[in-house]
Structure formats: C-alpha cells, structure tokens
Amino acid sequence: MAGTHILAEGAGNYLNFGIFHISVTNALIMGAMIVMFILAVVIPFPHHDADDEGSR
Amino acid sequence: MSAREDTAAEVVSPSRTSWTAWARYRITHTVPEGQWLPDRQPAYVASWIYVFGMATLVSLFIVIGSGVVLAIGGSEWWHTSNVGHYVNSVHLWSVEIFFAVMAIHLWGKFWMAAWRGGRALTWMTGMVALLAAVGTGFTGYLSQTNFDSQWIGAQAKDGLNSVGLGAWFNALNPAAALTLHIVVLPLAVGVIVIMHIILVRRHGVVPPIGAEEPTP
C-alpha cells in the first residue's frame, strides 16, 4: 500500500471537488477547448470583398 | 429548380439488367453532381465554427497515416527507435487534436440543432462515429506495450467484468486489443465517417436557426 502511495506521488497535480477528481492538465485542456469554441463563434471569419456577391 | 433536382431530372431510371447502370444511378441520385466538393457555400458557412468538421477529418487522415507507419514498424518499434518515437508522438497528438476538434464540432452542431431539415441521420452517424472513435482510442491505450497500457488494461478488465462484458472482450489480451485497434475499429470509424460525409454533402450544411428555406 505504501509503495502504491509512493508511485502515485508525482504523477501530476489533481483538483478535487467533492466526488469530482480531475488532473490539472485535463482541466486546462478542457478549458482551452471551451475557450476555442467561444472564439470560433465570436471571431469573424476572414473573407474577400470580391466574394460578397450572389450566394456567397 | 435546385442543382440536385436538375441533375436528378436528367438521370434515367436504373436498368434492371445492368448493375453498372444501377450503381451509376444510385451514386448520382444519392449526391448529385455539383454537391460533391462544392466551390461555393451559403454566406452563413463563413464562420470559424464550420471549420471544425474539416479539421476533424484532416486530423483523422494524420491519425490513420501515422498509424499505418506504426503498424509497419510494429507495436514495440517506438520503444527502440527515435523515428518510431517521433511517429508515435505524431499519432498521439493527432489523436488528441482529433478528439478536441471533434468535441468542438459536436458542440457547434448541438447548439445549432444540426439535425433539422431532414439531417437526423447525419447527426446520428456523427454520434456513432464518436462512439466508434472512443472505442478505437481505448484500444489504442491498451496497445502502447508499456506499464500504462498494463495498468489501464487491469482497470478496464474490472470495469468490463462489472457490467457483464468480460466474456466478450478481455482487456488484458493485448493481441485482441491491437487487432481491434488497427483493423476492426478503424474500419468501422472509416465507414461511418464516409457515410457521415455523404449525408452532409447530400443534405448540405445546416442553416442557422430561423434562416431555413420555407417548405413548399
């Protein structure tokens, strides 16, 4: 048991919220994905004025 | 008249005697010419959120390409070769990007209710593709040939046994995990993704809510 405990140490930093247990790395990646989603919705898509005609 | 109706009107009904005529009719009727690889899209497609479907597809190509190279080198190649280690890293990170952009693609399509306008099958094939990709990812964890895969295999074995699936799949059998990972599940993902893309091209990109064409 003590050996297992030693192996677990240094395996990364974790966040604990009640029953939720998540590594800082995974939390940061999920946060970055949410930020990327919001930016994809908010940031205007570049386009050329010449393409503004018709169905474009 | 839309391009699809125009093309469909030109196609003669399939011959009962020729399988080539039947196949040509089915292919042309499923996605008419002009809807494959279109060079123009509706104005609402000019948004970054519409980029993530193609980003998912591109990362899937890199996943498959790097996976093919790893398959040639063998499952333990990356432990002893710098080139193998590099290819393994390309495989890992392209998978990470694949799942990240696929999740953002899913969020975007969920919030724009992309199943509208007869696109329910497009939505469902996307969800099945996600599930198949998760299974492929899990068996990839089991195919690393290191202590991580051994640990994950032991945990997965207990989890699968607890829900009664242990009789069908033993997570501690690396040969089964590897063959599922490189043959069965990629084939499933590939077929479902092709179906998904055919449906996207057949029905077109979903318009924003409130911008649908009025039904006749």
Image (spheres, coloured by chain):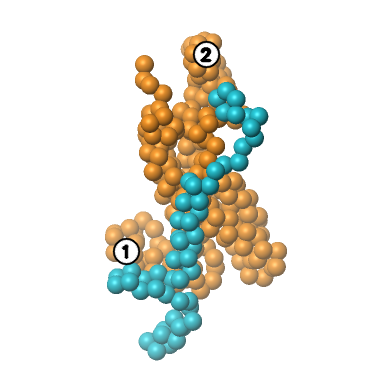
Identify by letter the chain in cyan. Answer: A
- Is residue B5 shown left or right of residue B162? right
Which numbered marker is on residue B151?
A: none
**Callout 1: chain:** B
What kind of residue is marked 1? Asn
> Could you tell me if residue B125 is visible in this image?
yes
- The residue that mark 1 highlights is B161
- Image height check: is B182 above or below A51? below
What kind of residue is marked 2? Asp
* Residue A13 spot, x, y in % from top left: 45, 76
The quadrant where residue A27 appears: bottom left
Say yes or no: labels 1 and 2 on the same chain: yes
* Residue B79 spot, x, y in % from top left: 63, 70
- In which quadrant will I find the N terminus of chain A? bottom left
Q: Residue at x 57, y 60 (%)?
A: B92
- In which quadrant will I find the C terminus of chain A? top right
- Is residue B127 shown left or right of residue B174? left
- The residue that mark 2 highlights is B6
